[in-house]
Image (cartoon, rainbow, N blue to C red):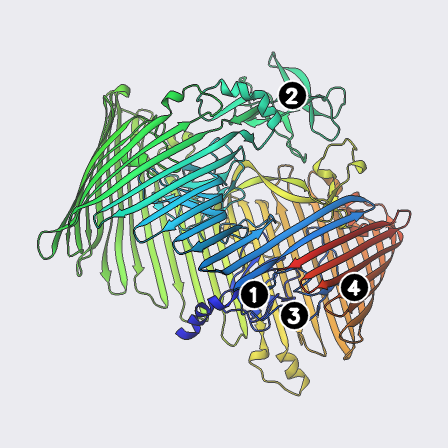
Amino acid sequence: MWLGLAIPGLLAGQTLPARDTLRGLPGDTLFLSHSLIVPQTDSLWRLGGKRLPPEAYTLDLAAGWLVIADSGYAGPWVMGYRYFPSGPRQALFFRKFNLVVDSTAPAPQVDVIYDPATERGETRFWEDAEGIRKSGTLSRGLTVGNNRGASVTSGLRLQLEGDLGDGLKIVGAITDENIPIQPDGTTQQISDFDRVFIRLMKDEYAVTIGDYEVSRRDSRFANFYRNVQGLQFERKTEQSRLSVSGAVAKGKFHTNSFMGRDGVSGPYRLTGQNGERFFIILAGSEKVYLNGVLMTRGENADYVINYNTAELTFTARHVITNITRIVVDFEYNDRYYNRSLLVGQFEQQLGERVKVRFSYARDADNPNAPFEDPEEYQAVRDSLAALGDQPGVATTTGIFELGYVEGETRYERRDTLVNGESYEYYQRSVNPELARFRIEFSFVGLGAGFYEPAPGFNDNVFRWVGPRADGSPAGSYAPVRTWVLPRQLQVADAAVEVALIDRLKLQTETAVSLEDRNRLSSQDDGDNGALAHRTGLRWERVPLGDSLHLTIEATQQYIGARYTNLDRLYQAEYNRVWDLPGNEPRRDEHIGGTRLELDYKRALILSAEGGLRYTGPGRLAYRQVYGVESRLRRMLQGNFTYTRIANADDSLGRDARWNRYEGDIFAPLGPLRAGVVVWIEDKIERRNGIAAPGSFAFTDLKPYLRTVRQGNFSADASFNYRKDREFLDGLMRDKSRAYTAYLQARYRPSAVLNVQSITSYRVLEVIDSAFAATGLDPARTLNTNLQTTFAPKNRLVYTNFVYEVSAEQLARREIRYLEVAPGQGQYVWLDSLFNNDGVQDVEEFQVANNPLVANFIRVVVPTRELFPTTRLTLSGNLRWDLREVIAKSERFWPELLRNTRAVTNFRMSQNKTREDGAGVFLINLLDPFGDSTLLDANYNLRQDLTFFQNSPRGDVKFFWQDTRSKLFLSTGPEQRGFSFVGNALRYTLKAERSLELETRLGRRYTEAEAFSTRNFNIEYVETQPEFILQLNRRLRFSSAYAFATRTNTRPDGVQDAQVWLHKLIFDAKWNLRDRNNLFTKLELVHLRQEGEPGFSAEYELREGLRPGANAIWQVFLTLYPLENVELSLTYDGRLSVDSPVVHTGRVQVRAFF
């Protein structure tokens, strides 16, 4: 067994990497660009989405094909793998794409030559004589048409690895493609799909150009981590290390600290350094701390994170409450200025006792290179310079009188009286005489502005909401423009470590920072510099006998008030360590401390620690920590810590005392461990000798019982009791009681069966009603995650089941449409059929059934409005295949049973308003959308039953699918869905002739509360028989007749329109010599319509065609003028009654390396 597991690693140096983009439907056989796949090297992702679990697909390693059995993972997909080099594929494959055409995911039905090595332009590899392994493609394309402008496309993807000779090695990945894959933060490991770099290595030298990470981790004052793009030089020897880097920083470091919400797992939306609310976090850059403990990312770990929306959600492992402390460090792309980063690091070992380290880092915004509005920036540059070192952001007016411009959002000025007061405000307008103002709005805080976003527009349009009855602002936005001032930070650091004698080390470190908070101004530059210094002496494990050792440590530290680091300077919960108010200003800080640790055989450890923090006259804090840790056998084990903090600030009359008792004490009971976690705190806050807000006390006890030995069964059960007291209205009051039951269990008797569950139930009781005014309410919260997998080795059946309940916050969302190149979208803007005002309203975007003109994509954008909900998720799949357990037979019925294969996939998710009662934790399977508490939901159920799959004589497939969704939008709820039932028949008459028949009955609908023109409810019947003639290996013809009837029904039950569609479809596929191939297709369509439905219904009914005769044709030619050069020529045409002919031509040249 161990040899089989080791083979992939042993042969890794003889294999090559590859990545394929695959398109089709779940259940299709998808061919990879290469065969002979290395075991355990494959990973399959949805394009722009999650990674698929291994059980979701079947991969044939030798033949290089896969089948995605789970319909819950719709394509396209990206497959990464390694393979044994055997040259590129030469064979030509034919495959028919049967794509579903529906309102939620419009897609044309196509029937094309499928050549995995050429059609997708995927990677081809070979090794040249010099030992350089190269892979990749270079493509250039041009698209023209009589109803669109010309567009040029290009792409480069190149991978290099090998030896250039004379010991010089190269590794690289080069591309000019902006790959739209941002990991979703649900896995522990992050794959960097679009990293572009070249790295040259020779002996102890290395040079990297492109994307890389630069960091320092061994410093007290100068640690940092950055994702950058630039140039790096490195030299490493046994005694020294030198690194010099010059780059453009991809992101900015920031940290968020906040308290959790009782019972809410998330998502918690993060904010930027300057109050930004919508930004992208650099994947993998985050560190998440929960109550001071570093968490691990992953669906089966501690948390997941959405990098695109900067939202953090904790898993069922953790019960989040209103006293949970959350700290998140991350890098994000702020896109204000071009930011450069210069870094130099040097480390040298001097003899056996001395080590020195030096570093310098410069992180600077370029004040001459703003990313947005450079002209406007130049206009206000002098005003920004006059602000000096003002921290944060500056504001200027956001009102610009530029005149009316058709197609752009403009406002007109108005005035009104409210409660006798006169107000001047601005309102969106399309009146050319009055709409003269372009206005930029900024978020200024809740209740600090007079404007709010206006729903229903495709642009950021705002409406005036006026004042409240007391005259205070009722909105959160104001017509102002915010400007982030360009900043520069330089940090120089030097550290020396000396081994004085055996076990005794002296460590000293000094750092200087220069922070210019406004590079546009020279004002206040005299105080930019600051100093930090630390000296420590550590005498480690001094023997006091055969079994007793003593460790002594003493430190002294100074940090100037203006000292700043590139990343975090203090530890994650520094304020809690010294009991510092969250809003305390930075001051010069002196800290001294000592620590003693006495250990007996490393089984019993006693420790004592003392510290003093001085920040000026009358401001002094003391900290004492005493701890014991026991690992002695046949005795109570665990750890216990007592912490006492005294903090005084004479300038505020503040005197605080904080006592903490924390411990985990347990007793081993064979395979079990029984224990109790103790957490008790008591804090007295006084101002001028009188008890003050900030005083509190609580007792938190958690007895538990868990298994400690690895085996088939593991469990962790606990019960948590907590009582809180807090100072309110001049008194210490009993605040609340909370009870939490927690159970985590896993049963895995073999590799065949795996059952695991995590469940917690929390009850919060409010003792004193006075705390209700602070927003504290009684609550009951259930979080559970149940997963079951059954996969026997005989492959007879495979089942996977997941049920999850969690308390989350749901953001109300808005629909936006983004413009893309024609043919790359799904929607079109039809202003002329609505109000024709030149302004993009959301209602004016409709599905484009002609894919050649579709130039908008639909995106869902979260707003800042969050609502507490209970989220339910139910998903799973069931597959059974009798071919492995029933022997072949000459009789029909046993053979039919043997060749029967069934696949069931389902996924349902709901967000309900949080209400009392067990019903909120259950999904109504019979009527999942009938719940009145439902805000947001997704429902997908697919059943496939196949007989004689892939048999040479033919096969039969029956299928049924029901997909529905409900969106929680600012304009009101919107429901969409489609369902169908059908069958597909394939029968081979002779080796060269075959028949195919597909029939489908279904329904498509959209119900939008705010946009009635989008609503439709279409029932349809479709059937398509097809005759296929394969004359030889090179030439194939097919002809088909398709009939469809579609009926739209209004909400009142009246059928307002019906369409009859007849199609004659002819196509030919000719495999020419030398891999050249030609494909032609012609569709003759006759459409008859009765009735006049709404616009969207008519679009859906007709597929974008006109009543009467229509024709659609396509010619696709692939040529290989050279062995490694591919030329693709495509011509598409469309003709309808009373409409001009639409011509579109595309040419693309692709070179393979």
Question: Could you tell me how far apart the alpha carbons at marks 4 and 1 are, in whole angstroms?
Answer: 34 Å
Is residue 1125 or residue 652 the one in the foreground?
A: 1125
Which numbered disc covers residue 1079?
A: 4
Tell me the kind of residue under disc 2. Answer: Phe
Q: Earlier in the sequence, mark 1 or mark 3?
A: 1
Q: Which mark is residue 128?
A: 1
Badge 1: few (under 14), some or many (20 or more) residues near its Cα, within 10 Å?
Answer: few
User: Going from the N terminus, do you reach mark 4 or mark 1 first?
Assistant: 1
Percent position (x, y) of residue 296? 40, 51
Where 147 sits versus 769, above or below? below
Q: Is residue 402 left or right of residue 636?
A: right
Q: Secondary structure at mark 4?
A: strand
Q: Secondary structure at mark 2?
A: strand
Seen at 65% across and 70% down, the residue is 945
Report, in whole angstroms, how far the alpha carbon at label 1 lies from the one at label 3.
48 Å
Q: Earlier in the sequence, mark 4 or mark 2?
A: 2
Q: Of label 2 and label 1, which has the lower sequence position?
A: 1
Location of residue 589 by image quarter: top left
Dot in front, 1 or 3: 1
- On screen, residue 1086 above or below 886: above
**Residue 825 appears in the picture as rendered:** no
- Closest to the camera, between mark 4 and mark 2, is 4
Label 4: how many residues lie within 10 Å, few (<14), some (14-19) or many (20+)? many
Q: Earlier in the sequence, mark 3 or mark 4?
A: 3
- Disc 4 to disc 1: CB gap under 8 Å: no
Q: CA distance from mark 3 to mark 4?
A: 32 Å
Query: Does the CB distance between marks 3 and 4 fall below 8 Å?
Result: no
Q: Quadrant of the N terminus?
A: bottom left
Q: Position of residue 554 (x, y in %)?
A: 18, 39
Are dots 3 and 2 in contact, CB under 8 Å?
no
| Label 2 – label 1 distance at C-alpha | 62 Å
Q: Amino acid at mark 4?
A: Phe
